[in-house]
Image (cartoon, rainbow, N blue to C red):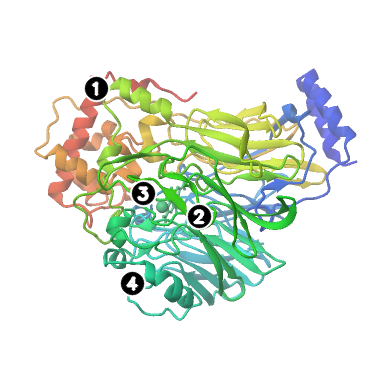
């Protein structure tokens, strides 16, 4: 018997009869052996299933906080903690890395790669990082500004660092690294801005580049001297047209998922959307634009191409196939097969034969109106007329945020269900009539003005009600949702399934929840106050099962201010739970909402031009219609009251230390004044409405 059961009994006795009964159940169970969470998806097949059952349906009610650590950043925390050798390794916003004793929470070391704040405007989605990999005594992290760094796992000392991107271009890195044998793999991001995507494999001991797989053709028409040359020449190049993609780089960033099958030596990775979005602008409305929105299989050792499956040919919608790739050996139609499962943004759930790439199943797991199913003979979606939004705007489901984004899903072999965190949201896609490629800017080539938050309270209420999140229990073999839980907001946490018959997920409102994996009944909930987007993990040490999660809301939700509940930006935390845990987290210091005060303030700028400039430059962080959350609410900012002060912030970088760097290379002084005029207009709308936002406090 390990100590865990006994500890739980003692703790339970202090609390309630229910907790005591639950803890007694625990003590009847053999203590779990040590079980690690050694890689991003727990195994390289990425089921995110923890084979530990100490915490189960009967006793989860007595789960409590064992320890926590407050982080030094209040931006989005997306990382999956890695637990090996009794140490928890996490990355945080700004690509920092920390090591903690997994039992006690004692901090062992920290590493700050000192990412320049000026990197922030190069990225779409906050200063996030999804995690490290740990192998051969080293910890590997990709940094927002495009470096790959190896640290000594014992001391956190830097061993080597290489630049993996052209830092003069708008590349960023948000994805977790992955190690396969002696190789460390890292992708990059930036398809919204204009880059060419690729995946790199480095020698983990030295940092030497071993191979690189580019996902779209070289705009110069030259070979790269890499294993992607041949498939790009033979398969991809004939399907790209015109010049716009050459300037913009084409997109196809590998910003999230990878999976590895050690038995076959095959590496799988997901490729992102096209840049710019509109296929008619990007490629003259012709060609499939390989390998955009594709799952690609290569030999891990060499990067040699094996097969690909393109989920969204003719991508015009930011439909990435970078979402989690899960490898599963299971019976499919009565025959044991090696399967690959993915729920990409486009709303279809795909099952492929992972050896041959053959498409076995493609069924919608969410509302899909851009395609009438997938043709199983050709593997192509039947794209509906009008979905390309050329004649008129198209109200599309799913939205560009995806029915499912990077937030990890989990599969339980016990229930044979896939638990997927989804978004219920449609998006009005409208053609941009005046697109010209501008280096370093957002280069999406859609009209973002159609995405404005409505002023009319009734329309706004309608919009809010139509956008939310769900956790669905998807039966991949019967194509049915077995249960669903509705969340008030979209973009909730990633998912963990455990052998205790439980599914854990955090939500945007800041609860960590445990559900019955069979029914979806909520059995336990812990209020963190901050929001959660990261996935929980579970491990066992000294006979005690732990559940760990990074807490801290952020990511692209900043764009959707008014349509998600008000959350002030709060410092992130790593929180670790166990049965009978009784640590009390210190209450957050929650700042009061700032009232709007623009009486008597005027501007010589033009608010209409200001809106266009704002959407180009400010929108991604400060939100549609300036309603953004998690960054300064510009309608309440003192800076908009004075032209000189506003210019000082926008053009001279007065708030650089907060991450608001100078935008002088993107915005002229005249345009800055137009933006100020637009912000004053939006602030006055708040005043006219009686500032309802300011009354909303965190629940
Ligand atoms: O095309 C890209 O390069 C790219 C990168 C990223 C990223 O690096 O996080 C996201 C996206 N696209 C994207 O489309 C998207 O919806 C998204 C959501 C998030 C997030 O962290 O929540 N990142 C990204
Ligand atoms: Ca994207």
The residue beneath circle 3 is 659
User: Residue 608, position in %: x, y?
Assistant: 15, 39
| Mark in the foreground, 4 or 1 | 4
Is there CB contact under 8 Å for labels 2 and 3?
Answer: no
Is there CB contact under 8 Å for labels 1 and 2?
Answer: no
Q: In terms of depth relative to the viewer, which is nearer, 398 or 598?
A: 398
Pick the quarter of the image with the N terminus.
top right
Q: In terms of depth relative to the viewer, which is nearer, 264 or 73?
A: 264
Q: How far apart are marks 3 and 4 (CA)?
A: 33 Å
The answer to whether 150 appears left or right of 450 in the picture is right
Classify residue 115 by image quadrant: bottom left
Is there CB contact under 8 Å for labels 4 and 1?
Answer: no
Residue at disc 2, CB closer than 8 Å to ligand 1: yes
Residue shown at the point (19%, 32%) measured from the top left: 680
| Mark in the foreground, 1 or 2 | 2
* Tally of numbered discs: 4
Q: How crowded is mark 1: few (under 14 residues within 10 Å), some or many (20 or more)?
A: some
Mark with earlier residue (2, 3) = 2
Q: What element carries label 1?
A: helix
The residue beneath circle 4 is 219
Mark with earlier residue (1, 3) = 3
The residue beneath circle 1 is 687
Task: Tell me the tag on residue 355.
Answer: none
User: Residue 81, position in %: x, y?
Assistant: 62, 50
Above/below status of 102 relative to 252: above
Q: How far apart are marks 1 and 3 (CA)?
A: 28 Å
The residue beneath circle 2 is 322
User: Residue 338, position in %: x, y?
Assistant: 69, 58
Q: How far apart are marks 2 and 3 (CA)?
A: 27 Å
Residue 558 in view: yes
């Amino acid at each position: 018997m390990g100590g865990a059961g006994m500890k739980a009994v003692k703790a339970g006795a202090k609390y309630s009869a229910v907790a005591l009964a639950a803890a007694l159940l625990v003590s009847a169970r053999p203590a779990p052996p040590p079980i690690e969470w050694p890689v991003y998806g727990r195994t390289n097949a990425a089921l995110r299933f923890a084979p530990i059952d100490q915490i189960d349906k009967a006793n989860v009610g007595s789960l409590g906080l064992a320890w926590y650590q407050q982080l030094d950043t209040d931006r989005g925390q997306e990382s999956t903690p890695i637990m090996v050798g009794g140490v928890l390794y996490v990355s945080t916003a700004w690509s920092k890395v920390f090591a903690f004793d997994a039992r006690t929470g004692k901090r062992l070391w920290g590493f700050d790669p000192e990412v320049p704040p000026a990197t922030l405007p190069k990225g779409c989605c906050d200063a996030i990082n999804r995690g490290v990999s740990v192998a051969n005594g080293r910890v590997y992290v990709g940094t927002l500004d495009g470096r790959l760094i190896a640290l000594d796992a014992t001391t956190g000392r830097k061993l080597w660092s290489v630049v993996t991107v052209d830092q003069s271009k708008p590349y960023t890195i948000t994805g977790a690294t992955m190690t396969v044998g002696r190789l460390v793999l890292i992708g990059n991001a930036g398809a919204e801005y204009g880059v060419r995507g690729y995946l790199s494999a480095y020698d983990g001991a030295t940092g030497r580049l071993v191979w690189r797989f580019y996902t779209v053709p070289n705009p110069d028409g030259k070979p790269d001297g890499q294993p992607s040359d041949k498939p790009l020449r033979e398969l991809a190049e004939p399907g790209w047209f015109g010049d716009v993609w050459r300037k913009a780089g084409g997109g196809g960033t590998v910003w999230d998922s990878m999976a590895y099958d050690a038995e076959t030596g095959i590496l799988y990775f997901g490729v992102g959307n096209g840049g710019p979005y509109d296929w008619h602008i990007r490629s003259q409305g012709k060609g499939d634009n390989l390998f955009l929105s594709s799952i690609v299989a290569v030999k891990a050792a060499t990067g040699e191409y094996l097969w690909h499956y393109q989920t969204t040919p003719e991508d015009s919608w930011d439909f990435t196939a970078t979402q989690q790739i899960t490898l599963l050996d299971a019976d499919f139609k009565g025959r044991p097969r090696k399967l690959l499962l993915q729920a990409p943004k486009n709303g279809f759930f795909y099952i492929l034969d992972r050896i041959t790439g053959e498409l076995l199943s493609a069924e919608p797991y969410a509302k899909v109106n851009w395609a009438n199913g997938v043709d199983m003979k050709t593997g192509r979606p039947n794209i509906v007329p009008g979905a390309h939004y050329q004649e008129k705007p198209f109200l599309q489901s799913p939205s560009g945020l995806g029915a499912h984004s990077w937030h990890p899903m989990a599969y339980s072999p016990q229930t044979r269900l896939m638990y997927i965190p989804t978004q219920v949201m449609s998006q009005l896609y409208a053609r941009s009539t005046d697109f010209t490629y501008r280096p370093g800017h957002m280069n999406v080539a859609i009209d973002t003005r159609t995405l404005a938050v409505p002023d009319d309270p009734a329309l706004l209420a309608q919009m809010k009600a139509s956008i939310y999140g769900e956790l669905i229990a998807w039966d991949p073999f019967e194509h049915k949702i077995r249960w669903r839980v509705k969340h008030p907001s979209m973009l909730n946490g990633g998912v963990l399934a455990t052998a205790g018959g439980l599914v854990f997920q955090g939500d945007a409102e800041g609860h960590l929840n445990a559900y019955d994996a069979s029914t979806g009944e909520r059995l336990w909930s812990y209020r963190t106050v901050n929001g959660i987007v990261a996935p929980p993990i579970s491990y066992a040490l000294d006979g005690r099962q732990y559940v760990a999660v990074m807490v801290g809301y952020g990511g692209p939700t900043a764009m959707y201010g008014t349509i998600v509940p008000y959350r002030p930006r709060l410092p992130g935390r790593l929180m670790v739970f166990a049965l009978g845990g009784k640590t009390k987290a210190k209450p957050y210091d929650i700042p009061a909402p700032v009232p709007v005060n623009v009486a008597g303030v005027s501007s010589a700028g033009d608010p209409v031009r200001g809106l266009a400039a704002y959407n180009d430059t400010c929108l991604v962080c400060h939100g549609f219609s300036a309603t953004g959350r998690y960054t300064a609410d510009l309608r309440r900012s003192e800076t908009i009251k004075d032209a000189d002060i506003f210019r000082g912030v926008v053009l001279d970088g007065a708030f650089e230390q907060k991450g608001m760097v100078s935008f002088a290379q993107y915005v002229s002084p005249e345009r800055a004044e137009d933006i100020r005029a637009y912000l004053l207009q939006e602030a006055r709308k708040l005043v006219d409405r009686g500032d309802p936002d300011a009354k909303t406090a965190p629940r």
